[in-house]
Amino acid sequence: MGYFRRNPSQSGGEIPITEMIENKQQDQITVKPESRRRNRIELALPLERLEKVSSWGGASSSLSYVYRPSTVDKLGQVFDLARRSGHTVGLRGAGNSYGDATLNSENITLDFRRMNRILDWNPTSGRIRVEPGVTIAQLWQYVIEDGWWPPVVPGTAKPTLGGSAGMNIHGKNAWKSGTIGEHIIEFQLLLPGGQIVTCSPEQNPDLFYGAIGGFGMLGVFTSITLEMHRIYSGLLKVEALVSRNLGEMFEQFEQLLPESDYLVGWIDGYAAGKGLGRGQIHKANYLAPEADPYPSQSLRLENQHLPDTLFGFFPRSFIWRLMRPAMNDFGARFVNSVKYLSSRLGHGSIFLQPHVAFHFLLDYIPNWKGSYGSGGLIQYQCFIPAENAQETIRQVLLLCQKRGLRNYLSVLKRHRRDKFLISHGVDGYSLAMDFRITPHRRPKIVKLASELDQIVVTAGGRFYLAKDSTLNPDIVQSYLGSDTINSFWELKRRTDPDQILQTNLWRRLFY
Amino acid sequence: MSNSTAPPDRPLEPHSKALIIGASSGIGESLGRLLAEHGYLVALVARREESLNDIRDQINAKIEGFPHAFSYKHDVTHYEEVPELFQQIAADLGGLDLIVYMAASQPAMTEDEYNFSKDKEMIEVNTLGAMAWLGQAARRFSTAGAGHIVGVSSIAGERGRRLNPAYNSSKAALNTYLEALRNRLSQKGATVTTIKPGFVDTALLANASKTMWVISPEKAAEGIFRAIRRRKQVAYVPGRWRLVSLIITHIPSFIFRRLNI
């Protein structure tokens, strides 16, 4: 424990952040951003640590010295090593960010997947305390049999809670339950200097609202306390509705919002003209107490699983190979059309589905991104205030079609504002679009993205760093505003004056 | 002036990143300029700091936008410095795609001179320095499953000749080392190119006995860049030296030792 500069007189070995700041030298507070951009290497790190680390979408990768600590002590030693050797440290959970948020080229990457213990669980209050490497899958599996479910889950169960808090993820209930940060009661943050700070909305609130969504730039979550959501059945009531065009989709969304617990829209990116924006809406609701006659049965872990085969025939692990030939304009148009037509046939159907099957669509087809080929994919997701949403999303879809870069998968969700400093939340809608990357398409997609950025910023929209691969610093400046960026820099100077914590995304957007 | 910072990496707009060891004059200098003009970020490594920094500043003044060239003072016989410096360069550029080992020493020799300190210097600069740098690169590139190693050797490595036994040996050793790296790396997605230039109008030429088909360093750099782009295994610069090499390597020893070449 010699490494940590802790004050022994305080219980838990914690130092309030205010006291910690007073101890800092004045010149450390006024560090210029540029001064740490180029780190001076004092000591070579062992080449055995050098690994290829890829963005989740696979469109970019870099080499990095990867360390996988299993305890807070070992974690501290890595920061110590970074300081002595002159390297920066990037944080990585399960590596599910689409772009460069978890890459730190030629420097240290901390992989948290071995810090994956559940530290405390209270099945009466629904409060759980976890280490940062615990995944969403571990979490729901741990709590479901006691009648609880994570209040916010993304489309895959693979992310870690540390990564989820760092990116402040959302789910299909974002307009109703907000982001995951709104369900975090408290966390402990290890600063690169070795201090551990406890943060909650009451204690060090500025750091609480800065570190959640702060994409790993202010410190490391060493434990996170969350509150789970009570459920009375392992099943959700799901309703599938068809929308014949974008206008109808927005109408249905607004109409369904008050009565739904989850709502997600799928848009056929190939439909043009009158059918522009056609697609399907899935609405899901929790079952009320007593509605499920056998909750203890439906909540059992073995009844929460994804089927082994699709359409009762194809083994799931094989599907991506079948999708591979369809991943071009012709194939994707066909698949999107078939999906739309089948959703017309299924319009209005209501069925019960296990939570897992409804939420983790992206886990249905293992390695589905493999079907995008070796160039990988990126996602472009924009968040538009409600008053401009329909018109802006229409423009976005039209521009993609005009540029000949149709997206193979587009998803519409409803959101709300939140109090976090680096926030993607708007009182409005988000559209997420997957683009296949090939050497030929790459420059065109870069150009398209910058055109889309302008449309989004004009509409007062926002972006989401977990998904980003294409933003420029000026766009970030205009959607976050210089006050927010200054406040974030201020926090960074307090918590990480030597700028040990860096990623490719940080260097790309915040310098 | 010191090194400025490289532009940050953008996932869909990557820059190619190159490292040239022996970049303060001759072919290395020309290749550095050429690569930068083609959009590469280039780390220039050499012993002579002043000329190195001049070249860097000239490149950066000529190319608009962000800086493309970065300079690092280093003596290739200081092998123990290599791991740190390599990591510094990779960190500054944000990665590495191409390494070119160009450094060479060829002191003046006479036919009846036996001088261990000159011999040692040639082996150290031409061979051991290459192993110190290219070994590091090979390790990285096999991890990355990509990358390109270029060793600039010489047609002097094809046979042992009268004038400079140690120079011939140093280049022959380099050829074999590069061939072995190629055999290790080609299955892993990386490329290894051996460049065999003929006579090039550089400082080294002063100590060659006879010369023919002399080309300028710029021409040589163009030839090397072409070989890099085509991912050649072995490239003679200019190409007609391939024929000379073919003949020379097939002359039997009982004739070769009677020839005055």
Image (spheres, coloured by chain):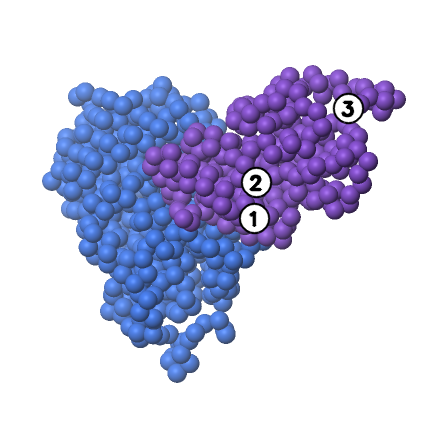
Chain colours: A blue, B purple
Left or right of residue A245, residue A172 in this image: right
Viewed as shown, does residue A282 lie left or right of B126?
A: left
- Element type where label 1 sits in the image: loop
Is label 2 in contact with label 3 (beta carbons under 8 Å)? no
Who's the residue at 44% across and 54% down the image? A39
Query: What secondary structure is found at the residue carrying circle 2?
Result: strand
Q: In the depicted view, which residue is nearer to us: A166 or A40?
A: A40
Q: Nearer the viewer, mark 1 or mark 3?
A: 3
Q: Chain of mark 1?
A: B
Q: Earlier in the sequence, mark 1 or mark 3?
A: 1
Measured in 3D between alpha carbons, the distance from the residue under mark 2 to the one under mark 1, in whole angstroms, is 9 Å
Numbered label attached to residue B74: 1
Lower position in the chain sequence, tag 2 or tag 1: 2
| In-image side of B168 versus A174 (left or right) | right
Label drawn at residue B21 = 2
Say if mark 1 contacts mark 3, CB within 8 Å.
no
What chain does mark 2 sit on?
Answer: B
Q: Which residue is rendered at x = 82% and y = 21% of the image?
A: B259
Q: Which residue is mark 3?
A: B261
Gap in angstroms between the C-alphas marked 1 and 3: 35 Å
Residue A314, percent from left and from top: 47, 30
In the rendered structure, the residue with mark 3 lies on which chain? B
**The furthest residue to the left:** A387
Q: Quadrant of residue A413?
A: top left
**A276 or A501, which is in the foreground?**
A501
**Residue B51 drawn at (x, y percent):** 50, 42
Reply above or below: A71 against B14: below
